[in-house]
Amino acid sequence: MLERRKKSDRLTTKQENLSTKFFRRVISFILATVIMIFIWSVVVSNGIFINGKINTNNLSRFGNQIFLVANNKAPISTLIPTTYEMPGGTSVYNKLNPSLKAPKDTELTQKTGKFTTLKMNGHFQFIMSPKDKLGRAVSSHIQLKYSDMEKIKGSERPPKINYNPVGWHNYKFSYRQGETTGVAWLMQRGHMVGYQFCGVNDDGRNLFPETAWTNAGSYDSMDDSNQQSQLYYENLLRNWLKKHGDDWLDYEVKPLYRGDNLVPDRVKLTFIGLTQDGKTESINISSSYGKRLDDGAEEVILSNSSPNAVINYENGEAIER
């Protein structure tokens, strides 16, 4: 009887060992497959291996990204391609910037703080702060009616901007937006207060290095439906002024720098409406990036970035993502 039990126990143990070994092999096979697919996807998605050949330029670029990550100058997420090319040709798009939430028509989240408007004097006002000790643009503040915009619209805009803000570098990087691919300039000389409001085009106090994505909402054109862009808010503020012809818009823009970085990594927009007698009125713009201040003003903070680039905000240099 005892011998039978021993044989039964040995048989059970053997079966358990076989089951454990089989399970481990299955798990190991799955993990190995996932790792191989991931490595293959990273290599192909970064253009390192194309048409059976190694692309040395893309390999060098990827090596530079690894160097930046290793030296804590870029997050590890920069090694992950924006677009994965999976086996079989399937493309998976990965937006590394925070994804947009659906616009909300409800009241914005309340935030402690107040917005100091310009003192009303019944006339158009545009105040540009002096540049700081590093030569960086600091802030621009405007107060205007729609009739002031109509005057600017009727004047001829200068053909180009000649001033280069501190930290200004520019690069042509490839991009993929939906099914569209191309090459476009990364940076623009961004106006803090847009030309359509102030009529000032080439003054360094109102210009800073700004990505095309943050300024115009697209890599190589203009998309005023992109909530991550200044253009989205500027055009909606213009529409508000047009609908409130007798009221005033008070609007301030500040680039936000970290320490002595020459390029801001964020841009803050603050705005509120004013009636003819100086009473404040909130301007309701649906935004995933806005907060309502105590006095009814709206504060929006945008990331000065681009999904196809890794930017060194200390000096303005960048590499393609």
Image (cartoon, rainbow, N blue to C red):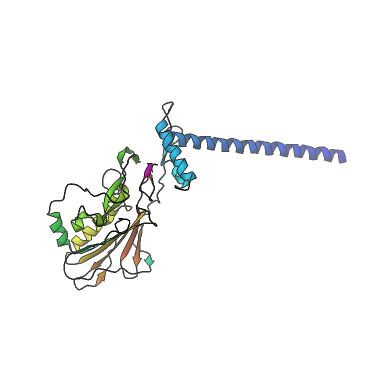
Q: Is residue 112 above or below residue 200?
A: below
- The structure residue drawn at horizontal position 86% and vertical position 38%, both measured from the top left corner, is 3
Residue 37 on the magenta span: no
- The structure residue drawn at horizontal position 79% and vertical position 38%, both measured from the top left corner, is 10
Which residue extends farthest top? Answer: 52
Q: Nearer the viewer, residue 126 or 48?
A: 126
Residue 112: percent from left, percent from top? 38, 69
Quadrant of the snapshot with the C terminus? top left
- Position of 43 with respect to 139 (left or right) is right
Q: Tell me which secondary structure the magenta stretch mostly adopts.
A: loop
Quadrant of the snapshot with the N terminus? top right
- The structure residue drawn at horizontal position 30% and vertical position 40%, both measured from the top left corner, is 184
- Position of 275 with respect to 95 (left or right) is left
Rendering quarter of residue 269: bottom left
Q: Nearer the viewer, residue 151 or 14?
A: 151
The magenta segment is 315-319
Q: Is residue 160 visible?
A: yes
Numbered-mark total: 0
Rendering quarter of residue 292: bottom left
- Position of 58 with respect to 122 (left or right) is right
Q: Nearer the viewer, residue 42 or 26?
A: 42
Q: Is residue 103 visible?
A: no
Residue 270: percent from left, percent from top? 30, 62
- The structure residue drawn at horizontal position 28% and vertical position 43%, both measured from the top left corner, is 220
Residue 317 on the magenta span: yes
Residue 23: percent from left, percent from top? 64, 38
Residue 310: percent from left, percent from top? 39, 45
